[in-house]
Amino acid sequence: MSKPKLISFKLCPYVQRSVILLKEKGVDYDIEYIDVYDPPEWFLALSPTGKVPILQVEDTVLFESAVISEYLDEVYAPALHPADPIKKAQNRAWMEFTSPMYMDTFNIMMAKDKESSDAAIKALIKNLEGLDKAMVNTPWFNGEALSLMDISAAPLFTRLAFYKKHCHLNVLENFPKLKTWSDELLARQSIKESKVDGFDDMLLMRMGKIGTYIHTANS
């Protein structure tokens, strides 16, 4: 089987899911990062949506991070989705639920005034309330076994930890179950290694360039 190749942006949470999954499965892979704000022509020719990430498998290009995760889980053992069809479907539904939460964290980064920042934080907290209700097991979403759902949520908690550390925004303070889950995820080696070197500095630089309200208010 040929080595898969990921193409993405260094701050993209969606490719981080794929990186975690590949590391958990011990798969040898290549990765190339592009500037999504000035993408090369060769990338636009490959990506049907013009978005990252994409996964190249020989002459085939896969896009959409959830699809990439499903493919990798089917091809490389061990399978991390639950075997039971209804449990698997339930996990897929909650994976879909987490995806808009990345837009919440992005909106916090992009907000240039207090009103917009507060609105983005409020939207995030509302979604966290929904996720909190689903978190009935420990240490992982389904109990003892790490799953794609855990991996799907890991980049979210990476960003929430960043906001807590650098912007004094602790959105998990009223969600002890999610905080415990986050601690378990962020302590896992594959998740630690999934962040690019200098991740925090690059994100801070990006926020400074944008003039993010929450960044300037806490500088």
Image: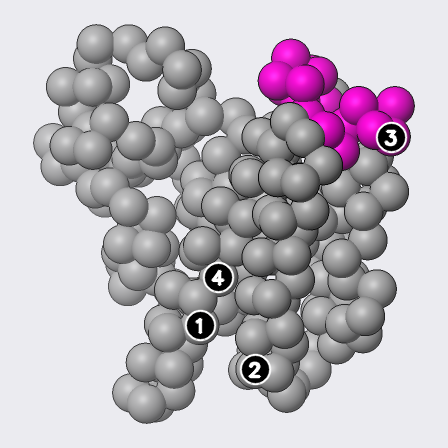
Dividing the picture into quarters, in which one does residue 163 lie? top right
- According to the image, label 2 marks what residue? 134
- According to the image, label 4 marks what residue? 98
Front residue of this view, candidates 150 and 136 = 136
| Place of residue 201 in the rendered image (x, y in percent of width and height, measured from the top left) | 73, 21
- According to the image, label 3 marks what residue? 218
Dividing the picture into quarters, in which one does residue 129 lie? bottom right
Query: In the rendered structure, which amino acid carries the disc numbered 2?
Result: Ala
Dominant SS type (magenta): helix
Q: Are marks 2 and 3 in contact (CB under 8 Å)?
A: no
Q: Are marks 1 and 4 in contact (CB under 8 Å)?
A: yes
Front residue of this view, candidates 60 and 44 = 44
Q: CA distance from mark 3 to mark 4?
A: 27 Å
Q: Are marks 1 and 2 in contact (CB under 8 Å)?
A: yes
Query: In the rendered structure, which amino acid carries the disc numbered 4?
Result: Thr
The 10 Å Cα crowd at callout 2, few under 14, some 14 to 19, many 20 or more, is: few
| Place of residue 123 in the rendered image (x, y in percent of width and height, measured from the top left) | 58, 57
- According to the image, label 1 marks what residue? 94
Q: CA distance from mark 1 to mark 2?
A: 8 Å
